[in-house]
Image (tube, rainbow, N blue to C red):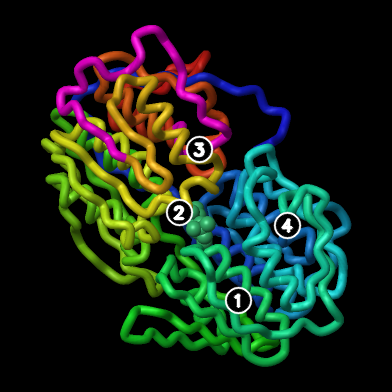
Amino acid sequence: MPHDIQPRLATARRSTNLSGTIRVPGDKSISHRALMFGGLAAGETRITGLLEGEDVLNTGKAMQAMGAKIEKIGAEWIIRGIGNGALLAPEAPLDFGNAGTGSRLTMGLVGVYDFESTFIGDASLSKRPMGRILDPLRRMGVQVKSSEGDRLPVTLHGPETASPITYRVPMASAQVKSAVLLAGLNAPGITTVIEPVMTRDHTEKMLAGFGADLSVETDRDGVRTIRLQGQGRLSGQIIDVPGDPSSTAFSLVAALIVPGSDITIRNVLMNPTRTGLILTLQEMGGDIEVLDRRLAGGEDVADLRVHSSALKGVTVPAERAPSMIDEYPVLAVAAAFAEGTTIMLGLEELRVKESDRLSAVAEGLALNGVDCTEGEASLTVCGRPDGKGLGNAAGGAVKTHLDHRIAMSFLVMGLASEHPVAVDDSTMIATSFPEFFDLMAGLGANMEVEGRIAQ
Ligand code: S3P
């Protein structure tokens, strides 16, 4: 997000009968990787369905700054990559705005090169921990300069020849796994990443698609060992990016909690490392039909038909967290309208997202009349199925802390609450879902952005 943009309050009000068929924008994780790997691979990569959110566009700008040629012709993004091992030194700091994925994966990709690269971001990104990426990079020989204790701004300088390492990922993080693998692309020999808990596997799948020599072995306990042969050739690919399940989550929960709703969401990525929310909502009694399951570009996709439903509270086990890590804020909103109590466990990683999402959600729920308890790594929410008393009649706005998913989740809450729900800023929604207000308005949702009615 541009750093000088003025915050814009947004408010959502009780709505009924959401209806229609929508396509949500392309998956953010796959879009970042498509631009990065396309920019790196030799030859041409053509991408359709790319998410054109600010986060992803910043990754594209970073790849351009390191020599990739990127242009959009019609609906297609066409990239001429530079070739693995041939990135150019960026002349200016690489600005990743709000994006953890863009910055962390790019640190892995370029940090091992024998030149300087500097990484900067907005106020949210500058508070997030980067040690989780910098530690393995240091072991590969990278020098790190950071005056902020492993937070941005950070300057990296790789060694003459990077050392391939074996790295056991200490937390459930696809970004850490990916950063080490991408660093391994430019190290001679085999880089090995051990992943005790499986996280989204887009890096492994897409790198193999681009021609990397990579193998994955899973043992009896589910521990995955990923081996990558460095310095191989990558070649351009054709990629059609499926719809983002994390963006799908907002209209999905809205349709479940707004009475009389019946919506269809087309072309949703159904990779099992991303579908924890759908499973949880189905366990809560959500009427979600998964239609026309199919394979598209090596990924499972499907259409979802969703009817409003009487939800009931459940316990969401800690093991499920990696497959729905970005969906807890909107699940907490669904739980606020469920009969009984929902307990969410294993949420430690929520504390280091675009905001401390665990406390941002708990504070926002409390402001809007929801009975909830924030634990160290858990959240308990007691629901009010009719939404009576929920919302904030006095106009108090949820603090979003530059976090797009906090903003969108609480706007969804307002669609089924007795009183309106306001968020103190909505500009950062453009980082991941620029079409959010238009799509929601098209379904019949009553949302208003300061100075503009989104309906
Ligand atoms: C992502 C991984 C997750 C997720 C983020 C996207 C990725 O982060 O929260 O939105 O594309 O690899 P962590 O690796 O920090 O869990």
Q: Residue furthest bottom?
A: 189
Secondary structure under the numbered disc 4 in the rendered image = helix
Mark 1, residue position: 181
Q: Is residue 306 above or below residue 412?
A: below
Relative horizontal placement of residue 67, taking residue 41 as reference (left or right): right
- Inspect the image, locate mark 4, and give the three-letter code of the amino acid beneath it: Ala
Q: Secondary structure at mark 2?
A: loop
Q: Identify residue for label 2.
A: 26
Residue closest to the far top: 394
State the residue at coordinates (81%, 84%): 161
- Which amino acid type is shown beneath numbered disc 1? Leu
**Nearer the observer, 441 or 150:** 150
User: Which mark is drawn over residue 404?
Assistant: 3
In magenta, the rendered stretch is 380-407
- Quadrant in the picture for the N terminus: top right
| Secondary structure type for disc 1 | helix
Report how far apart the C-alphas of labels 2 and 4 lie in the structure.
Answer: 20 Å
- Tell me which residue sits at (51%, 25%) in the image: 399
